[in-house]
Amino acid sequence: MTDSKTDESRAERAARVAAAAGMTATDGAGDADAPRSADVMAATDVLTAAQRVALARKPGRPGVAEFVHALFGDFFEQRGDRSQTDDPSIMGGIARFHGRPVTVIGNRKGSTIEERIACNFGMASPEGYRKAQRIMRAAEKFGRPIITFVDTSGAYPGLEAEAHGQGEAIARSIELMSSLTVPVVSVITGEGGSGGALALAVGNRVLMLENAVYSVLSPEGFASILWKDASRADEACEVMKLTADDLLELGVVDGIVPEPAGGADENPAALYQVLDTAITHELAELEKMSRSALLEDRYRKFRAMGANAVKRGRV
């Protein structure tokens, strides 16, 4: 169970992220009546879960390539898993963030139809996850913080992927991230689908864009399995508790990054500024910890997920 100190830290982190955008927050969720910066004031406060899913899937939404270009310098992409091939649906490499060397990894969906096909619409193969593991091991060896950007509907479920060990690759990635002794900040930027998302999201701090979603499977899949009716996907969105506000309350994420009105693609520059501030704050906090403390911090974070919601009778 989480103690009051843990709860206070989560609330403080969420408030700090909100303050970076010129808004107020209580337990990380913006007060609908509070004044907010014109650049980031979102009519999204009144959106339904289904509408947020639609925004998370919006084709023009910034992806990992855009985040890397806007937030980092001297990016050097690393390719290949050193065993089979390179999977372009996961992008990773070394960069500088405000002068400090970091490792950056993220799901890549692509922006044009040709890129989307080449990147398999962001659904990674086992080779992609093994590439990410290789890059993370190098970051661990040289003591570089890791920043991940998660945006995938899920890992690729094809026959070839399963034959190449998709489940094992995801499990190894989760295992590796759980054992890292460097700071890890993960950002859910669009869709966070199933184990394919979790494989890049075992972070000391997990931030979530305001209109991103994070769930065990898609609403359509949930409705098909539970009710045998995929047309009830909108209803499933509400039941699944997949929005940023829901997941902050459950302790799955640590802070919500506000988006411009209409979604992240409406004013990417404003979003980049807020996200830059949020990541800077989180890294500054984590870099004060020893390697053993970082490992323990991440362990306790994931063990405590949902504890507050259980106490409040939410689950």
Image (cartoon, helix red, strand yellow):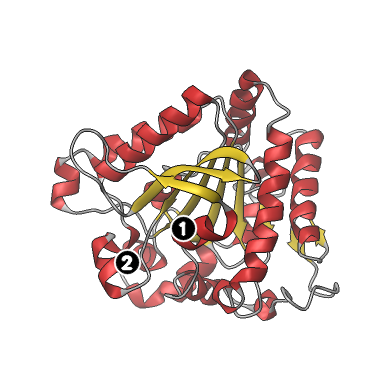
Residue at position x 26%, y 54% in the image:
156
Work out whether mark 2 precedes mark 1 in sequence or the reverse, and give the earlier one.
1
Residue 6 in percent (x, y) is at: 75, 36
Position of residue 218 measured from the top left corner of the image (x, y, whole percent): 39, 63
Give the answer, above or below, for where 301 lies relative to 113.
Answer: above
User: Secondary structure under badge 2?
Assistant: helix
Q: Is residue 281 visible?
A: yes
Q: Position of residue 306 (x, y in %)?
A: 62, 44
Could you tell me residue 177's position as x and y percent? 47, 32
Q: Secondary structure at mark 1?
A: helix
| Residue 64 tag number | 1
Q: Is residue 122 above or below residue 306?
A: below
Q: Nearer the viewer, residue 257 or 7?
A: 257
Q: Which mark is residue 21?
A: none
Residue carrying label 2? 224
20 or 7: which is nearer to us? 20
Identity of the amino acid at label 1?
A: Val
Instruction: Please tell me in which quadrant of the rendered image residue 200 appears.
Output: top left
- Alpha-carbon neighbours of circle 2 within 10 Å: few (<14), some, or many (≥20)? some
Amino acid on which the number 2 mark rests in the picture: Ser
Task: Residue at 33%, 41% (x, y): give it.
Answer: 129
Residue with the most extreme top position: 292
